Image (cartoon, rainbow, N blue to C red):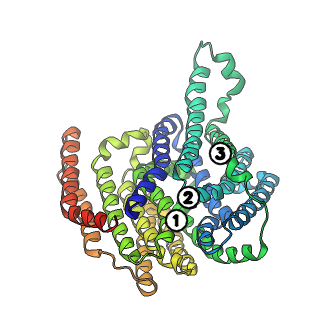
Amino acid sequence: MNPLKKLISQTAIYGLPTIVGRLLNYFLTPLYTYLFSPAEFGDVTSAYAYVSFLLVFLTYGMETTLFRFSQSEHDKEKVYSTALTSLFISSSVFILITFIFADSIAETLKFSGHSEYIIWFAFILGCDAFAAIPFAKLRELGKAKRFALVKSLNIGINIGLNLFFLAFCKNVYDASESVFKPFVEMIYNPSIGIGYIFISNLFASIITLFLLYPEIISVRWKIEQELWKRMMKYALPLLLAGLAGMTNETLDRILIPYLLPEEIAKSQNGIYGACYKIAILMTIFIQAFRFAAEPFFFKYSKEKDAKKMYADIMKYFVIICSVLFLGTMMNIQWIQYFVGEKYRIGMDVVPILLLANLFLGIFINQSIWYKLTGQTGYGAILTIFGATITILFNVLWIPKIGYMGAAWATFICYASMMVFSYFLGNKHYPVNYDLKRIWGYLGLSVTLYFVSVFIKTESVILNILVNNLIVLGYFAFLWKAEKNNLKQLVKTNQ
């Protein structure tokens, strides 16, 4: 298959469960934001910020390491066995330690009186970290359909249980009469509240391990010590990069409860977390692309036109992201109703976060230079550089301008990392990116958004109509500008 078509196909397959799941999760946001107060949703926001951070720590770069060593080692099963056994041991130790110190951890993380949250999340993290290697193996083998199936079932179970507990059970429990009431009263406790979000996640994570049973049971359950040392040497810089990267991605939602006055901290975090979800399409596309692109970049690296292919991929990646940015912002007047009224005050962060995540996507594309050359230490340096910016500006700005400071810190962090990585990559693994078109298309997208703000009328319907005509015009312009290049690219790679 044409390699570009294969990348697009696998991005779509990997992205399907992510897109559907994220969209369905997105449709749970109204349920959460209309059912829970901003302060309660702030606890959910904080909890998942910690989860994202810890998941990187518990997988410690083994996914990318599996891809790299599967290409260089003759015995791929030995690589898989070593990685999976290593993750099993470390995840088990983490669960045990967290279980022992649950009360102290809950107090430290401002979940006082809810040590059960800590225990539930210990098992969620342990299961998800361990499952990361079977999922990576499916990606390495190109089994995108099985990957998509298991991911889809995980997402479906999680969302289904959320709806069962927070919609069905709550409504039946609150009703004066219902044939289901005796059953619901046995299994539903309204005082658990947001805890049902975490319980649903826990069940989904456990069931996912059972679904991955064929990939887990086939392993030899043995660590080859010499191989493991080499893998860890490659992985540890990726761990540092991952931790620094997750600092950039989630630290704001961890710091807000600590940097703002106690009476507003949780509600501010809840508003920020809810509005962050409006950037859903951008983050979904970037995640789906990341799943497909990483193994693709490694496999295609030996082809003579590899750098040309990487440059083309970057251009079309930015084109898609610019359309997503413009499409989201041109429809923000109705998209905002997906969160409760108390949360809409934070909508000003959306364009900032959309562009910030676009810059992150560009940085992910650029990261091929240090991964392909084995210079993963540079990846750690770049993300630590970004983390330093994140910490500095969050600490400076959150106390002064609240969650807007967190949004701008994210924007500056990813923009700086993108620029820094470009100049380093040009030195160590130069790729001739079409900068004129990349920044021209993105600049036009942002300009059209500001034009729409300037010409806004009192009629919401008229605004939405005019805005979407602008989006269609932008899309038509892109098609005219790139039609011949796309045809040539497809023809060259047939």
| Any part of residue 447 in sight | no
Q: Any mark on residue 295, and which?
A: 1
Q: Is residue 172 above or below residue 212?
A: above
| Any part of residue 135 in sight | yes
Query: Residue at the location (61% across, 61% down)?
Result: 53
Q: How many marks?
A: 3
Disc with the residue nearer the chain's start (3 vs 1): 3
Point out residue 384 in the picture as x, y percentages from the top left corner: 55, 75
Disc with the residue nearer the chain's start (3 vs 2): 2
Mark pair 3, 2: CA separation: 16 Å
Point out residue 223 in the picture as x, y percentages from the top left corner: 78, 67
Q: Amino acid at mark 1?
A: Pro
Query: Residue at the location (50% across, 63% down)?
Result: 399
- SS under mark 3: helix
- SS under mark 2: helix
Q: Amino acid at mark 3?
A: Thr
Mark pair 3, 1: CA separation: 23 Å
Label 2 sits on residue = 139
Label 3 sits on residue = 208
Quarter-wise, where is residue 350 in the image?
Answer: bottom left
Q: Amino acid at mark 2?
A: Arg
Between disc 3 and disc 1, the foreground one is: 1
Q: Any mark on residue 179, and which?
A: none
Query: Residue at the location (42% across, 62% down)?
Result: 357
Point out residue 134 in the picture as x, y percentages from the top left corner: 65, 55
CB contact under 8 Å: marks 1 and 2: yes
Mark pair 1, 2: CA separation: 7 Å
Q: Is residue 207 above or below residue 105?
A: above
Point out residue 188 in the picture as x, y percentages from the top left corner: 67, 27
- SS under mark 1: helix
* Label 1 neighbour load within 10 Å: few <14, some 14-19, many 20+: many
